[in-house]
Image: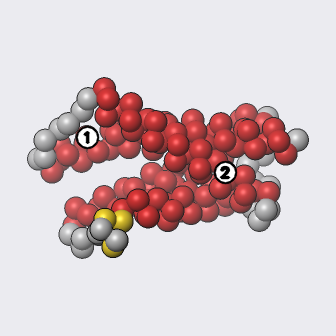
């Protein structure tokens, strides 16, 4: 049962990552660039890269979800929020440039950071709902 559960969490993490972090993330970037007046740079290659990177990060999130559910015994939406938050913290290490974190304190940077945090939390909720859908477990509050 645990082996199937691992594969289901990886699958739900990858699908959720591709949909939420990949496609939705690319749409949010496009909308944000239109709002701020920056050049809209949409290409098929960029969209496919976003989907691929979203599924890779989502698979890592699936492993985190498996650990949260089985090791820490946290289920339901609590595991979703915890997984999304941990995955966001882990992905902050991708923002390291030249050995230091580069985060400005401008309004656009703060707004972008809030949107990214909400996307990772939405990823966690979607991954848990999809996992419960795959496993046939309809009870999210356990």
> Residue 51 appears at what percent x and percent y?
44, 35
In this view, the residue farthest toward the front is: 98
Residue 73 sits above or below residue 44 on the image: below
Disc nearest the viewer among 2 and 1: 2
The residue shown at (46%, 59%) is 91
**To which residue does mark 1 refer?**
30
- In the picture as drawn, the residue positioned furthest to the top comes out as 44
* N-term mark: 2 or 1: 1
Q: Is residue 7 visible?
A: yes
The kind of secondary structure element at disc 1 is helix
Is residue 133 left or right of 38 when viewed as pictured?
right
Quarter where residue 129 is shown? top right
Quadrant that contains the C terminus: bottom right
Q: Nearer the viewer, residue 13 or 142?
A: 13
Q: Residue at x 25, y 40 (%)?
A: 30
Residue 63's label in the rendered image is 2
Give the crowd class for mark 2: few <14, some 14-19, many >=20 residues within 10 Å.
some
Q: Is residue 132 visible?
A: no
Residue 80, numbered label? none
Residue at image position (46%, 36%) is 52
For the N terminus, the image quarter is top right
Name the residue rendered at 79%, 62% in the picture. 71
Judging depth in this view, the residue of 95 and 120 nearest the camera is 95
């Amino acid at each position: 049962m645990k082996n199937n559960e691992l594969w289901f969490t990886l699958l739900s993490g990858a699908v959720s990552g591709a949909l939420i972090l990949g496609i939705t993330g690319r749409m949010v970037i496009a909308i944000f660039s239109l709002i701020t007046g920056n050049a809209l740079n949409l290409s098929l290659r960029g969209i496919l890269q976003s989907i691929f990177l979203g599924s890779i990060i989502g698979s890592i999130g699936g492993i985190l979800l498996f650990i949260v559910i089985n090791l820490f015994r946290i289920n339901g939406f609590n595991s979703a929020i915890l997984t999304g938050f941990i995955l966001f913290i882990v992905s902050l290490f991708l923002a390291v440039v030249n050995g230091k974190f580069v985060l400005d304190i401008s309004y656009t940077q703060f707004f972008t950071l809030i949107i990214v945090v909400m996307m990772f939390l939405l990823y966690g909720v979607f991954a848990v709902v999809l996992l419960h859908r795959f496993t046939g477990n309809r009870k999210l509050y356990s």
